[in-house]
Amino acid sequence: MSSRFTLLALALVVATSPSVGAQASAPPNPYKILTIARETVKPGRGPAHDKLESEWARAQMAAKSTYHFLAIRSLTGPRETWFLSGYPSWAEYTRLNKAYDDAPALAAIDARMAPQESEMLTDSRTMVLRLRDDLSYGQASLPDMRFFSISRVSVRPGHNAEFVDERKSVKAAHESAHVADSYSVYEATAGAPAGTFFVFIGRKSMSDIDDGEAIHGAAYLAALGGDEGRKRAAAAAANYLAGSQTDHYAFLPKQSMVSADWAKSDPSYWTVKMAGAPKP
């Protein structure tokens, strides 16, 4: 990845299946800005790209970089690698990225690695998202997660208010029914068409999906308004929705740079061995 951004703490986005008590006491998500560097890998170049990205991350570690990010790879849809970074504000985004740009050792690593990577990709772009805390529900520890389910929702021009109203109803139903679930909603502000929203769900295992129907049971459906509520939601979606797609992603610890506190959650998973790391 030719640009590296910082991931500042343990809870960038929310994770699935925390306890109800944990939801009630969880602090608000501090990461108002989320950047995603998305790379689409050429067919057949996946293993080579994984190797290069792992070497890139180890080179930055050897250079004592303090810039942290989480790498994930698509399990469905096109072969893509995403690098996620969170910031509490635009001011902090600007400060941290300037510090990165002013570090000669990191610039040298990028200059060496980027030309190799360009031959492996069909597309590379960066999206900037803002947290919609008013549409999000719950929060849990990201270091314990191993997968994301990410839904990309495209809203018809002029219909954002309808989408927001519907998502607020969904959040209110979760709160009313005390659903043991959680998700974060982000809205694209750059790098994607206006009216693009992302819903992130963290998972410890893909088998968590099996629990979806049970945790969204009778109490939740009642809070939504029962059958009439579901019909109303379907009618609203038909009006505001231009398209949506859900894909699943696996975490890539060898291609990530996480803090020491993050790695403490599971050192055998998060700690990358430095033996043989290339010198910057």
Image (tube, grey):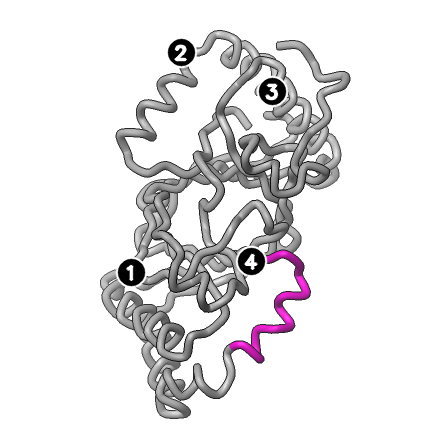
Q: Is 221 contained in the magenta span?
A: no
User: Where's the N terminus, which quadrant?
Assistant: top right
Mark closer to the chain start, 2 or 3 = 3
Please say if 180 is above or below 265: below
Residue picked out by circle 1: 134
Residue under label 4, please give it.
149
Label 1: how many residues lie within 10 Å, few (<14), some (14-19) or many (20+)? Answer: few
* Quadrant position of the C terminus in the picture: top right
Disc 1 is placed on an element classified as helix
Q: Which of pointers 4 and 1 lies earlier in the amino acid sequence?
A: 1
Are the residues flagged by discs 3 and 1 in contact, CB closer than 8 Å? no
Against 195, residue 255 (above or below) is: above
Residue linked to disc 2? 102
The quarter of the displayed image where residue 97 is located? top left
The three-letter amino acid code for the residue at tag 4 is: Ser
Residue type marked 3: Met
Spot occupied by residue 16 in the image (x, y as percentages of width and height): 53, 61
Marks 4/3 in contact by CB < 8 Å: the verdict is no
State the residue at coordinates (54%, 41%).
82
Residue 91 picture location, percent across and down: 26, 29
**Residue in the image at 56% along x and 15% along y:** 64
Q: Residue furthest bottom?
A: 227
Tell me if residue 64 can be seen.
yes
Within the magenta stretch, is there residue 214? yes
Residue closer to the observer: 123 or 58: 58
Closer to the chain start, of discs 4 and 2, is 2
**Residue visible at 59% across and 57% down in the picture:** 203
